[in-house]
Image: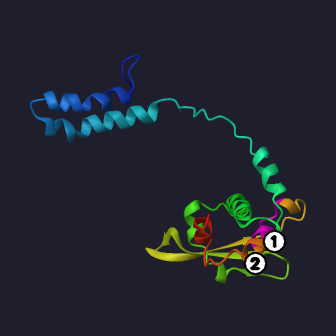
Amino acid sequence: MTSFPSGSTPQHYQNYRMAVCLLHTDPDLVRSSTTRKALLKRTCLSAPPKEMLKSAVDIAPTLRFLAQIPSGHSASFNKLNQKNTFLFAMAAFFRPSDLERISLPRCTSNVGGHIQLKAIAPKELRAGRPIIKTLLVQKNEQFKELCPVRAFHALRSHTGNRAASLWQVVHQL
């Protein structure tokens, strides 16, 4: 049998497994049944794909807000940090946990105006060992108001910044 009766789904059977285990004469047999597990797995794989309905998110208002924050010393430290964090998330695909691991002293700028960020020991491992994730973020010449390199340089040289990592910057707020 490759499918459940009409109107039933694998989730129905998984939901009632607990009740069946409580009422069955040998609950361990039900829990460890490879036949039951194979039936559920086969049915889930043969079921049509389920569409994920997520509403579209318009980030235009956020980008307009960030563009209004100047990338210089005239901006408040908190606003500049918000801008920098969001732009790094977009430009370098950083997760919030990666921000904690960026070492500001190890970040370098090259002649072209690009910055090289080093996230020390991010969650990813290679052969069971922590790594240093190096990312190159390029200057955005078309939209200078939304350039992550300019925002980073402004944040790094801001008088309110005494942090060694972006995580400390985030937690100074």
Q: Residue furthest top?
A: 6
Q: What element carries label 2?
A: helix
Name the residue beneath numbered marker 2. 157
Instruction: Measure the C-alpha gap from mark 2 to mark 1.
Output: 8 Å
The image position of residue 31, as x and y in percent, is: 21, 39
* 84 with respect to 18 (left or right): right
| Residue 40, quarter of the rendered image | top left
The image position of residue 6, as x and y in percent, is: 40, 16
- Where's the C terminus, which quadrant? bottom right
Name the residue beneath numbered marker 1. 73
**In the image, what residue occupies the spot 60% across and 32% down?**
53
Secondary structure mostly seen in magenta is: helix
* Magenta stretch, residue numbers: 146-152
The image position of residue 49, as x and y in percent, is: 53, 33
| Circle nearer the N terminus (2, 1) | 1
The image position of residue 160, as x and y in percent, is: 70, 74
Q: Nearer the viewer, residue 43 or 163?
A: 163
